[in-house]
Image (cartoon, helix red, strand yellow):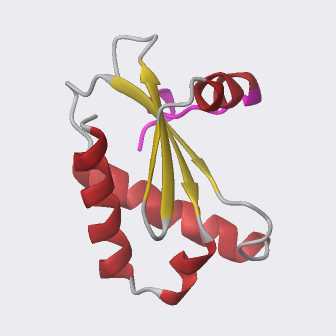
């Protein structure tokens, strides 16, 4: 995922989360808000309760690859994706399918 498609600043994370449009699944919580830029952006958050720093970074890399597979230029929303603890218990393929279902549910 290119850097311009990522949300990095805490202020933008908080703004999107405060918008309160969200959906949940077993492994993810997804917050959305209409996009500011001409393209959709994604932010990924993995809380410290989920795992140590090495595992959190691995999870972020995996989630970025999931997003690359489903990302389309015509998406209409900025997205914050928060990973939940059950993510660790599921397989890579199950997590990918779960995220795809969630994105379809939200209609990004």
Q: Main secondary structure of the magenta part?
A: loop
Residue 104 appears left or right of 42: left
On whether residue 2 falls in the magenta region, the answer is yes
Quadrant location of the N terminus in the rendered image:
top left
On screen, residue 15 above or below 28: above
Q: Is residue 96 visible?
A: yes
Q: Can you say whether 65 is above or below 33 in the image?
A: below
Query: If the image is split into quadrants, where does the C terminus sit?
Result: top left
Residue 3 position, x and y percent, is: 51, 34
Q: Which residue is located at x 24 percent, y 37 percent? A: 107
* Residue 41 appearing in the image: no
Taking depth in this image into account, of 58 and 42 the one nearest to the observer is 42
Considering depth in this image, is 75 or 62 the residue closer to the camera? 75
Q: Which of 95 and 41 is in front in this view?
A: 95
In the rendered structure, the answer to whether residue 63 lies left or right of residue 106 reads right
59 in relation to 33, above or below: below
Residue occupying the point 48% across, 32% down: 21
Looking at the image, how many numbered discs can be counted on the residues? Answer: 0
Above or below residue 5? Residue 61 is below
Lateral position of residue 33 relative to residue 38, left or right? right
Residue 67 percent coordinates (x, y): 35, 51
- Left or right for 39, reference 43: left
Residue 45 at x, y percent in the picture: 64, 51
**Quarter-wise, where is residue 56 in the image?**
bottom right
Residue drawn 26% across the image and 47% down it: 105
Q: Is 98 contained in the magenta span?
A: no
Provide residue 86's location: percent of width, then percent of height.
55, 79
Highlighted range, magenta: 1-10
State the image quarter where residue 52 is shown: bottom right
């Amino acid at each position: 995922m290119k850097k311009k498609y990522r949300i990095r600043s805490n202020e933008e994370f908080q703004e999107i989360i405060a918008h309160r449009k969200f959906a949940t699944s077993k492994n993810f919580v997804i917050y959305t808000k209409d996009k500011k830029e001409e393209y959709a952006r994604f932010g990924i958050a993995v809380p410290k309760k989920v795992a140590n720093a090495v595992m959190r970074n691995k999870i972020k890399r995996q989630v970025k690859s999931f997003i690359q597979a489903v990302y389309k230029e015509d998406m209409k929303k900025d997205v914050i994706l928060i990973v939940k603890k059950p993510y660790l218990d599921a397989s890579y393929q199950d997590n990918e399918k779960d995220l795809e279902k969630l994105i379809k549910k939200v209609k990004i």
